[in-house]
């Protein structure tokens, strides 16, 4: 038997089992505060029609950027910038340091990629370093960059773990303006003297809170310290904790601060809890997944082995399922992501780390099959749905 909660006031009746300890090879593990009850993080959605639409000051047609870049942007159906794009693009074009605080799914990649392509178009000697917490996010940034820079002879190198380092070393011997990667792999390549940061004039720290959380701070420091003293720094984060403020003070000079964060969770995500006994958990999940409205579902588990077992079980039940986790190599993870994005499969099972930074359009449901370790992980998970003005549903299973 299971019962689905209908009112947030009922959530306090059952204790949450959030909390505990999750190891990290870089940070040596991190401890998490537990939550007293699930009402701390479950909220009903605010109807999208109640949200006052943002009125941008600019349009993509009006931005003072290279005409070829503008044509690429407009041909990608970009017309009205999102709040972070509207406010960040002119600031970046001016050369100022920037702190951008924004929810996931707000279009921040385009907010820094577009003005930086323009920067390179105006000065081919410009070199730009972009750091991201995960290989998937780094690859997405590279793909976005290539789309907007099409036909402009502007090249990039993407350096991430899980891909052969020899290929990346070879790429770095060619001409490029953008170097995109995860801090660990970038530092590895720097120590191998595969590139020098002496000539890099701009650095982007995307999802800086996640990089800090994953223990990359020393790698970030090592990379930035190898850059010229005077450079432009663009810092993007979904949160503004005391630790993040210290990093901002360390890395940035008189930054322009832009915050378009609307709250901890997306207003367009309807969140709910389902109480279920262990033996019936997989059967209930299957019953949900075969419903027609569950047409693009991201399921989260806690461990890579558990995620793979769940994926295989759902396949045996006849569902079109893929998985991404730490035991999958780079090509396997990218293959599963492409299949999910292209609707070849309609269910993707993932661990938190593997799914960080993913921007997958039209995810209808997020299911927390197993509870996340922290409130921040929960926010990240449910932020994969309800994006770009569309409604989404997040369901959390409680044993």
Image: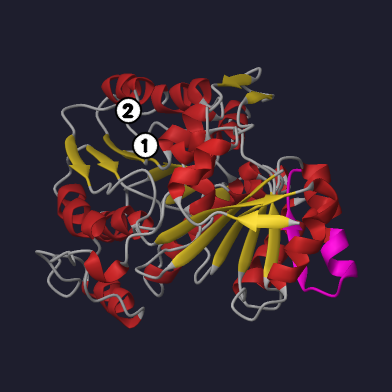
Report the residue marked by disc 1: 199
Q: Locate residue 199 relative to residue 392 in the image: left or right.
A: left
Residue 301: percent from the left, percent from the top? 71, 47
Q: Which dot marks residue 49?
A: none
Q: Is residue 234 above or below residue 249?
A: below
Q: Quadrant of the rendered structure where residue 348 is?
A: bottom right
In the rendered image, residue 314 lying in the magenta stretch gets the answer yes
| Mark 2 crowd level (few <14, some 14–19, many ≥20, 10 Å Cα) | some
In the rendered image, residue 363 lying in the magenta stretch gets the answer no
Q: Mark 1 and mark 2 in contact (Cβ < 8 Å)? A: yes
Magenta segment: 312-326
Q: Compare residues 316 and 56 and report the one nearer the observer.
A: 316
Residue 240: percent from the left, percent from the top? 32, 31
Whether residue 203 is visible, yes or no, is yes
| Mark 1 crowd level (few <14, some 14–19, many ≥20, 10 Å Cα) | some
N-term-proximal mark, 2 vs 1: 1
Report the residue marked by disc 2: 228
Instruction: Give the quarter of the figure containing the N terminus.
Output: bottom right
């Amino acid at each position: 038997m299971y019962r689905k909660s209908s009112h947030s006031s009922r959530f306090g009746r059952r204790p949450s089992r959030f909390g505990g300890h999750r190891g990290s090879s870089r940070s040596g593990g991190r401890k998490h505060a537990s939550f007293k009850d699930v009402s701390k993080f479950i909220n009903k959605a605010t109807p999208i029609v109640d949200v006052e639409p943002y009125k941008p000051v600019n349009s993509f047609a009006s931005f003072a950027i290279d005409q070829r870049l503008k044509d690429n942007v407009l041909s990608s159906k970009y017309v009205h910038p999102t709040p972070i794009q509207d406010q960040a693009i002119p600031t970046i074009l001016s050369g100022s340091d920037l702190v951008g605080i924004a929810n996931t799914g707000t279009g921040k990649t385009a907010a820094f990629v577009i003005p930086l392509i323009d920067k390179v178009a105006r000065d081919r000697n410009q070199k730009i370093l972009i750091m991201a917490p995960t290989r998937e996010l780094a690859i997405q940034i590279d793909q976005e960059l290539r789309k907007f820079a099409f036909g402009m002879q502007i090249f990039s190198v993407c350096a991430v773990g899980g891909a052969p380092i020899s290929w990346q070393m070879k790429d770095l011997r060619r001409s490029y303006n953008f170097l995109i990667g995860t801090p660990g792999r970038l530092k590895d390549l720097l120590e191998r003297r595969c590139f020098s940061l002496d000539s890099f004039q701009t650095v982007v720290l995307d999802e800086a809170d996640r990089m800090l959380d994953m223990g990359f701070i020393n790698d970030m420091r090592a990379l930035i310290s190898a850059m010229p003293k005077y450079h432009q720094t663009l810092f993007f984060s979904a949160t503004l904790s005391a630790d993040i403020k210290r990093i901002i003070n360390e890395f940035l000079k008189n930054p322009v601060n832009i915050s378009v964060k609307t709250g901890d969770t997306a207003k367009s995500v309807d969140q709910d809890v389902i109480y279920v006994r262990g033996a019936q958990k997989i059967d209930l999940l299957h019953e949900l997944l075969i419903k027609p409205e569950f047409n693009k579902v991201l399921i989260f588990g806690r461990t890579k082995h558990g995620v793979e077992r769940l994926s295989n079980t759902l396949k045996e039940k006849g569902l079109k399922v893929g998985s991404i986790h730490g035991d999958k190599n780079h090509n396997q993870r990218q293959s599963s992501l492409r299949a999910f994005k292209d609707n070849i499969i309609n269910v993707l099972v993932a661990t938190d780390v593997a799914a960080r930074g993913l921007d997958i359009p039209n995810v209808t449901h997020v299911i927390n099959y197993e509870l996340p370790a922290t409130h921040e992980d929960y926010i990240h998970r449910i932020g994969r749905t309800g994006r770009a003005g569309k409604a989404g549903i997040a369901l959390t299973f409680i044993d």
